[in-house]
Image (tube, grey):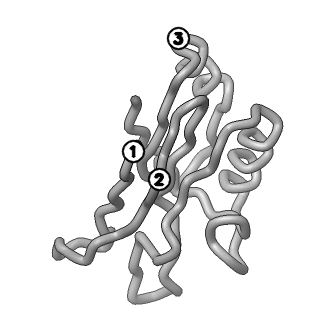
Amino acid sequence: MACIYKHPHGSINVTELDAILAHNNRTFLFGDFNAKHSSWNPGRSNATGNILSNWAVSSAIDIIAPDTPTHFNHNAPSTVIDIGFAANFSHSNVFTVNELSSDHNPVIFEIS
């Protein structure tokens, strides 16, 4: 398991993610990727989201994202940018909880 944070600016290098996956055939990567893609954030995409979606599809990795927003910004629409990727890892549920006074809701990943 690895928790990832990608700064909102700059690009993501999937070779670094591949290096993490190479250490174990069962891997769960999760965190704030600052990535938007229509497959987990309807109507919105950015470069990081496109890169990660293509990487996950080509690598046969499951994309795990909640149905509700994870990030709230008073100047822009709410978005889902906190997501997970599972390689050979069972998962059963993902959801957010409104428990913190933050611009992000915590994301709970239930793993079976």
State the image coordinates of residue 20 (x, y, percent, origin top left).
Answer: 53, 20
| Residue closer to the observer: 39 or 9 | 39
Residue 111, quarter of picture: top left
Q: How crowded is mark 1: few (under 14 residues within 10 Å), some or many (20 or more)?
A: few
Q: Which residue is drawn at 56% across and 38% down?
A: 86
Q: In the image, what residue type sits under mark 2?
A: Ser
From the viewer's perspective, is 92 left or right of 13?
left
* Secondary element at image label 2: loop
Residue at the (29%, 63%) spot, across then down: 106
Is there a contact, CB below 8 Å, between mark 3 and mark 1?
Answer: no
- Circle 2 crowding by C-alpha within 10 Å: few under 14, some 14–19, many from 20: few
Q: Where, quadrant-wise, is the C terminus in this rendering? A: top left
- Along the line of sight, which residue is nearer the eye, 47 or 3? 3
Residue 92: assigned label:
2
Q: Which of the two discs, 3 and 1, sits closer to the camera?
A: 1
Return the mark for residue 23.
Answer: 3
Label annotation for residue 111: 1
Ranked by sequence position, the earlier of labels 3 and 1 is: 3
Label 2 vs 1, first from the N-terminus: 2
Three-letter code, disc 3? His
Residue type at mark 1 is: Ile
- Which residue: 64% across, 22% down? 18
Image quadrant in which the N terminus is located: top left
Q: Residue at 42%, 48% (x, y): give it.
A: 31
The image quarter in which residue 50 lies: bottom right
- The spot of residue 5 in percent (x, y) is 42, 44
- State the CA–CA distance, disc 3 to disc 1: 20 Å
Asked which secondary structure carries label 3, the reply is loop
- Image x and y of residue 2, in percent: 40, 31
Q: How far apart are marks 3 and 2 (CA)?
A: 24 Å
Is 88 left, or right, of 110 in this rendering?
right
Point out the frontmost of discs 3 and 2.
2
